[in-house]
Each structure stands twice: as C-alpha cells, then as structure tokens.
Amino acid sequence: MKAREGFISIICLIVMPVLMIMILYLEHTTRLGRLILRSTENNIQSYYSAEGKIYMTLHEDKYYSDQLYPALVEYFRALPFSKQPKDITINREDLKLGDELDKVRVILVDKDNKKELQLVAKSNFNGLITTVTSYIELINEIFEAENPILDVSSIENRYKEDLIDLLLKISKDININNCNKPENIYGMESSNFNHIILDKKDNTYFEIISFRESMTLPYIETFNNKEVFIIIREFGENPVNFYIGNFNTPKETIKLSGLIYIEGNITISKDFEFTGIIIARNGEIKIDENIRTNIKGIMITNNIINNDFIERDDIIYSRHSVYKYGTYLPGFIEPKLYLIKSD
C-alpha cells in the first residue's frame, strides 16, 4: 500500500509541472494573441486614418478646391520654373483623437513623360505611426494622347465620347472671371459679334476688331500683351467667324501664346506662331494657302472638313504648352487615384 502511495506521489510530481507548463503556455499564447490582435487593430486603424486624409484631400472642397487644386494650377502655370506645392493642412476637427499629424505631402513627379501626383499622409494611432502613399493620374487623358490635332471624327474610338463630353463641359463652364487669370494675360470674352479679326496693329500692339451686321462701326480693342485668353461664343443663328490676320493689312507674322476658344470657324489668314491651345467648337479650322504656321500645343475641334489639315507638320504637340494653358480649361485637371499603399 505504501509503495502504491509512493508511486502516485511520483506521478503527481511529474504531471503537475507538465500541467503548469501547459497552463503557462496557454496563458502566454492567449496574452500574445491579444497583443497581436491589438497591434493589428492599431495598424489597421492607423492605416485607415492616413488613407482617410488622402481621400479628404481629393474629395472635400475645403481641401481639394481650396488647397490642392490652386496649388496644382500654380505649379503648371509656373512651368518650367515650378516648385513642389506646399503640404495640405488637415483641420484639427478632422483628425482622429490623439493624432496630431495634420499634413498631407504633395509631390509631382514625371512618369512616362507625364506628370503624376503623389499624396503622402501619416497618422498616429495609439503610438503607431503609419505612412500611406497614393498614386494619382492627374491630367485628363485626352490631353495626354500626344496628338497635336484632336477631332471627334478622327480621334481613336476610345476617346470619342470623352472628347464630345469635354467640349460640352468647356462650353458650359469656361469663363475668364473664375480662373484666376494673371494681369499680364489679355482677356476677352464675347457673345455679341459674328465676325472678329485678330491682327497686329503695329510693332507693339495687337487689335481685335469685332462687328455684326447691325453695326455701322466695328468695336475695337487694342492690347500689347503677348499672352491671350480669348472666348468667343455663338451669336444668334449665324456662325461666328474668327480670323487670325486680315489679308487687307501688311503681311507680318502674328506671334502669341495662350488659349483661344471659338464657338464657330477659325481662319488663319497670316503667318502665325502660337504656343498654347486653340479650340473651335461647332466650326472648322482653316489655314489659307501659302500661310506659314508654327503652332506648339494642341488644336481641338469637332468639325474638321479638310483632312489634309490633320497631316500638317507645322502643328506640333507640346506637353509643356498644354500643361501651362490647360489649367484655364474646365475638365483639364482630373485626378484619378489608381494605387494607394502603406510604406
């Protein structure tokens, strides 16, 4: 009997430590699991907090319209001497409790000869700091197609509807007064005339002569700016005719840059050097015979009649010019987020 009791005691001495080890192991595993779970939750919350700052920057007016968009416009208009935009500042009431990281970094980089936007945000959740970077296509892809002449009838099929929609958006929203036009750019917006002539007045000044059938004398504006922002809208049922150069005046090359938007026909009647964007909506673009042009930028229309016009080698796509003057067009800057990841 005593031998049996001794045997049981030995078994207990062996089993008890094993049980204690198992209990301690389970307790440690449980504690470790809780720590891992808590760390995972913190990591997820920290990630979503940083991600949320990027989405706020892209979609809320107080960050996109008031901070990011103006910074992008300033960047493109200052090319090629642009500096990286300032950080976006997130309002304190939009931050998670305990998170004081209120900056979203704005970076513009070159990728495949195009400008790409990167937004970098950090967040602090329970002491865990997470950095998230987003990658964003910035410019409406129609302007990135590298075609010097865009026409609804000749553009690639995948762009047709987008070009039609773009021209419609531009016609509705283009406006000299809401695009922060600098003082050094001459601006004209009109819907009162059928015939408009842009010509050189002398070696220093240009003039725009505008008239309609009911007028006895034309309306004339004179300016000496080398950059222009001209909007001529439809007038009545008759088409608008915009002439660059008057064949009745001395033959001198007209040199300008900027943006010209005409709801009607554009006829180039003098040698013309231009850097920027020319748009003819509901009209055609014609270049008179023996006229030399040097156009760097992009020309857009929805009514090309002479297909030889598309093959001209003196109209050259210039991304620099398109970026600089495209900022005056509605629908030019169109951020599209395609990737977001934690660093």
Image (spheres, rainbow, N blue to C red):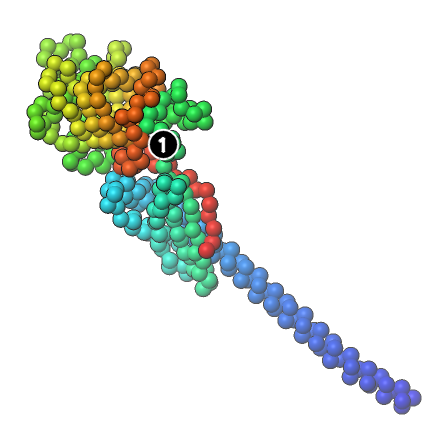
Please state, as top left, top right, bottom left or bottom right, where the N terminus lies in the image: bottom right
Residue at the extreme bottom of the image, as rendered:
2
Within-10-Å neighbours for mark 1: few <14, some 14–19, many 20+: some
Quarter of the image for residue 267 reads top left
**Numbered disc 1: secondary structure:** loop
Q: Is residue 62 visible?
A: no
Q: Is 62 drawn above or below residue 207 in the view shown?
A: below
Across and down, in percent, residue 339 comes to 46, 45
Q: Which of 342 and 145 lies nearest the eye of the viewer?
A: 145
In the image, is 232 to the left or to the right of 114? left
Figure disc tally: 1
In the image, is 272 to the left or to the right of 49? left
Q: Is 18 drawn above or below residue 1 in the view shown?
A: above
Quarter of the image for residue 159 reads top left
Residue at the extreme right of the image, as rendered:
1
Across and down, in percent, residue 12 comes to 80, 82
Q: Is 262 drawn above or below residue 19 in the view shown?
A: above
In the image, is 44 to the left or to the right of 105? right
Q: Is 48 drawn above or below residue 191 in the view shown?
A: below
In the image, is 38 to the left or to the right of 218? right
Quarter of the image for residue 157 reads top left
Q: Give the residue number, with chain letter if any, for mark 1.
A: 146
Q: Is residue 48 visible?
A: yes
Residue at 25% over, 10% down:
238
Residue at 35% over, 52% down:
105
Across and down, in percent, residue 161 comes to 42, 24
Residue at 46% over, 62% down:
128
Residue at 73% over, 80% down:
17
**What residue type is disc 1 on?**
Glu
